[in-house]
Image (cartoon, rainbow, N blue to C red):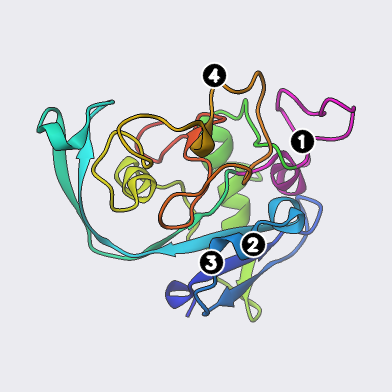
Amino acid sequence: TAREAEYLVVELPEGSTTAECPVRCVRTAYPSSAFNLQRYKTEKYVMKRVRGGEAWISNGSADVRSGNKRYRVCLTRDYHLGIFELTQKQYKLVMNKNPSDFTTDGAGEKADARPVNKVVYDEFCNPTGTGGFLVRLCNRTTVRGETIGGFCLPTEAEWEYACRAGTATKFCCGNTFDNAYGWTTANCTSTMVIGTTTPNAWGLYDFHGNVYEPCLDWP
């Protein structure tokens, strides 16, 4: 089943009225770097299986080892999470628009593989009319011709659990931020192409910096 797949690869045909977005279930545990190609950042959307478990989660920016502002969560089910941030091209293929800043690179080419931004919470989750981005995916994604749905933003606990990837430090790369793991005002002046930083221990990219990432319970 889709729930048991190591990866879900969602095809994104152009046009918000396209009937189907077929989903390929990949059962082999390839390294995430196998998907670090342009087509997986623009024409497809790749989600990786995250095993459930327990972890200390911080409340704010506290180091979870300190005992200050922390709580323990238990995620009883596996879930799938995008290995990259959602890009401008992926968003446009589903929504027929691109609200982002930095829509071209320094050479004037389209910044298709940069993350989409300036998308408010309701534009992801809005269930009315033709629906927000995730609602459209739920209505159109199919496995062997059957609609599977089930797409939603991660909860804050799911997001931080995946970001930490088994660590108990302030960042997934340690207690001191390493610029190799993310884009911040210290090393860039605009959004940057996804998947160009070092992934965390679970093969997930771009958690630190680049753009703000909303959660289901923390918009």
Mark 2 → mark 3, Cα distance in angstroms: 8 Å
Checking the image for residue 186, the label placed there is 4
Side (left or right) of 82 relative to 17: left
> Which residue, given by chain and number where applicable, does mark 3 sit on?
31
Q: Residue furthest right?
A: 108
Checking the image for residue 35, the label placed there is 2
Residue 200's x, y, as percent? 44, 49
Give the quadrant of residue 49: bottom left
Mark 4 → mark 3, Cα distance in angstroms: 29 Å
Identified at 57% across, 76% down, the residue is: 25
Whichever of labels 3 and 1 marks the residue nearer the N terminus, that label is 3
Side (left or right) of 217 relative to 152: left
Mark 2 near mark 3, Cβ–Cβ under 8 Å? no
**In the rendered structure, does residue 107 fall within the stretch colored magenta?**
yes
> Which residue, given by chain and number where applicable, does mark 1 sit on?
97
Mark 2 near mark 1, Cβ–Cβ under 8 Å? no
Mark 1 → mark 4, Cα distance in angstroms: 30 Å
Point out the stretch of residues depicted in magenta: 86-112
- Dot 2: element: helix
Q: Main secondary structure of the magenta part?
A: loop
